[in-house]
Amino acid sequence: MRMDSRLDILRGSLQTFLLAIGLSCASLALPQDVGTPDSLATEPVTAAVVQLLAVGPGAEDKNRECAATGFLVNEDGYLLTNAHVIADARRCLAASPGTKIMAKLARAGARTAPAVSCDVVALDDLHDLALLKTERPLPEGERPAYARLDPVEVAEGTAVAVTGHPAFVWHPTTQKGRVIRRAALGLSEKSKEKSDVIVLDIPLERGASGSPVFLQAGGGVVGIVERQNPARPSETVAVPIRYAIELVNRHGVRWYSVPR
């Protein structure tokens, strides 16, 4: 489930404008579809989800646009996604020095979504995780929610949900399912070492990489979507959240647990 890369003529013209003025310079209000899904108000995790965007010159001087998902873990603008999302974005931006990944922030009841540029704080290639931070904090009135993390070892049959931006959808969408098994897979091209993973019975499309996997009961994030199972497209592979907690702890980043 790699970062979705395709030409989008209408959105490409907007992104060309963003490149022209410099993606890293400001917080920008990107237009959204009219209206906001009810899930923004009812799902506690949904408001913490961000769409990660990168755009750069592609073949024949046409824009190449990449998108994936991430989610905020505290009010300071730290967010989690996959390491391969960063690799894909850097390829997308390779011909555009100085441009950065943008995070489009969801806001309940809003018709526009502010977008801010992000710095990469740390990568964990073994578990395909990345820690990012928005370049500057948003004003308190625009500050989005953050997700609460739950390091519980989820068992087979556990009811979970995933909120993200699959297939380039502008608003975050939520799909529900269950954990069908746990496994060990190699997630890094740089190492043969395997990582524990959670396998879900939720079919997700490209662009959902980095989405939070959270408990339907309680809302705590228990994993991060890594990819679609290539052997079984109806399944999704996710990385247990404990690896992400280890990553943020190594860098002294504050995160919040689910109240017990």
Image (tube, grey):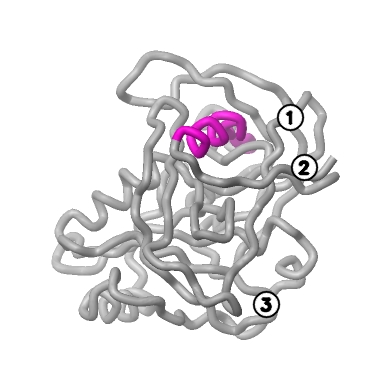
Q: Residue at x 76, y 44 (%)?
A: 258
Question: Which tag is nearer the camera, tag 1 or tag 2?
Answer: 1
Image location (x, y in percent) of residue 19:
24, 74
Question: Which tag is nearer the camera, tag 3 or tag 1?
Answer: 1
Q: Amino acid at mark 2?
A: Leu
What residue is disc 2 on?
215
Q: Quadrant of residue 17?
A: bottom left
Image location (x, y in percent) of residue 50:
53, 61
Disc 2 secondary structure class = strand
Q: Is residue 248 above or below residue 26?
A: above
Q: Is residue 41 left or right of residue 223?
A: right
Q: Which residues are the magenta region?
A: 234-250
Structural crowding at the residue carrying mark 2, measured as other residues with C-alpha within 10 Å and reported as few (<14), some (14–19) or many (≥20):
many
Which of disc 1 and disc 3 is earlier in sequence? 3
What residue is disc 1 on?
152
Q: Amino acid at mark 3?
A: Thr
The answer to the question of whether label 2 and label 3 lie on touching residues, with beta carbons closer than 8 A, is no
Q: CA distance from mark 1 to mark 2?
A: 10 Å
Q: Quadrant of residue 14?
A: bottom left
The answer to the question of whether label 1 and label 2 lie on touching residues, with beta carbons closer than 8 A, is yes
Q: Amino acid at mark 1?
A: Val
Image location (x, y in percent) of residue 153:
72, 25
| The C terminus: image quadrant | top right
Q: Is residue 97 above or below residue 218?
A: below
Q: CA distance from mark 2 to mark 3?
A: 23 Å
Q: Residue at x 60, y 79 (%)?
A: 141
Q: Residue at x 54, y 65 (%)?
A: 169
Q: Is residue 99 left or right of residue 88?
A: left
What residue is disc 3 on?
36
